Amino acid sequence: MTRKRFYRWQLLGLFAGLGLLVACSGGGSSSYSQPAEKPAVKPEAAAAKDDYAPVDQPLPVLRSYPVPKGSGPHDVAPAADGGVWYTAQAAGKLGWLDPKTGAVSEVELGPGSAPHGVIVGPDKAAWVTDGGQNAIVRVDPVTKAVKKFPLPGRNVNLNTAAFDKQGILWFTGQGGAYGKVNPSTGEVSIFTAPRGNGPYGITVTPGGDVYYASLAGNHIARIDRETGKATVIDPPTPNQGARRIWSDSKGRLWVSEWNVGQVALYDPAASSWKEWKLPGGRPQAYAVYVDDLDYVWLSDFGANAVVRFDPRTESFESFALTKMDAAVRQILGRTGEVWAAESGADELIVLSAP
């Protein structure tokens, strides 16, 4: 599969149904200049407002940083050295941005590369899910040396990854697979997803449990780290398109429901769900990320906005993106900063204190 064909395939159908632009609520913006398990639905048991400590957090300001034209930045990951990694999916490279100067450097990942996700591992290296090469790729943060962990067998359309507490990297493939890599031995294991195509986002809870979301399968699943078996957990809304998933500080799972424009919360301790519709006429919730204050961040393709949800008040605030069809597909952050990639605008953005 060529990179060009792969990238076109990734973009197919994602821009349908754009709605009205949601205005920024109080935050400024500026360009850069310097066996299936289906638990009962118990809304009253999930996300009680007093379960989260109150915080007094000012509305952040949005700043943007251009990256080389044609990059198609997909995912971002704040680097250990203060920079920000991003996957240039359309160019087959891993980029690194210096937020202080706006300077960008790039690393070639190999022939046919089409990188999707990037995270920073316990070794401070960048770890990339490269669908074009059907491999997990490690990029050394100092030497920029590239090491590949090829997947055996067919191309599974690699998506995202997360490290568990034992240092094992778990990953998803939309082609109906999930798996793990042991960085110490180089061993790669693949498992068949219980409902076929769809595994997309993945997360690890503070307690060490691994969960993934299945976009085509309309569910989330818990992976048994010993056996590799995945147990399906169905959200209350059918055909919701569970796309990405993130754990909060209490081990609760937040899910972006793409098909219905909702954010969902699953509490494993209570086996309960709760869901909220994003604001606007036709929301499409793509990315989800929970920051260190337990604010829930989402990208909304329908409103061309980034949205912050406060579980304490169950309220939303929208931050309009400055470029049309910006297409934010993933969000990640570090203390005081929320980063995202605008794949449709060849920019990275950050929301941080004024």
Image (tube, rainbow, N blue to C red):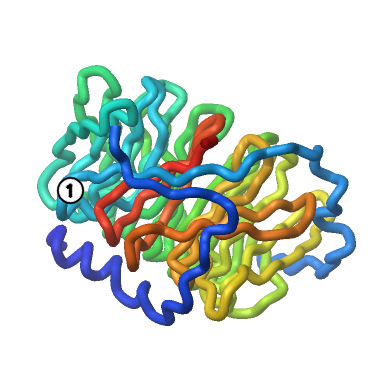
* Residue 285 percent location from the top left of the image: 53, 66
Q: Is residue 247 left or right of residue 38?
A: left
Q: Image height check: is 75 above or below 207?
A: below
* Residue 187 percent location from the top left of the image: 37, 35
Q: Residue at x 30, y 74 (%)?
A: 12
Q: Please state which of residues 197 and 31 is positioned toward the viewer in this rendering.
A: 31
Element type where label 1 sits in the image = loop
The local crowd at label 1, few if under 14, some if 14 to 19, many if 20 or more residues have their Cα within 10 Å, is many
Q: Residue at x 47, y 62 (%)?
A: 305
Q: Residue at x 41, y 58 (%)?
A: 321
Q: Is residue 321 left or right of residue 275?
A: left
Q: Is residue 193 visible?
A: no
- Amino acid type at mark 1: Gly
The N terminus appears in which quarter of the rendering?
bottom left
* Residue 169 percent location from the top left of the image: 45, 37
Residue ID for mark 1? 92
Q: Quadrant of residue 325?
A: bottom left
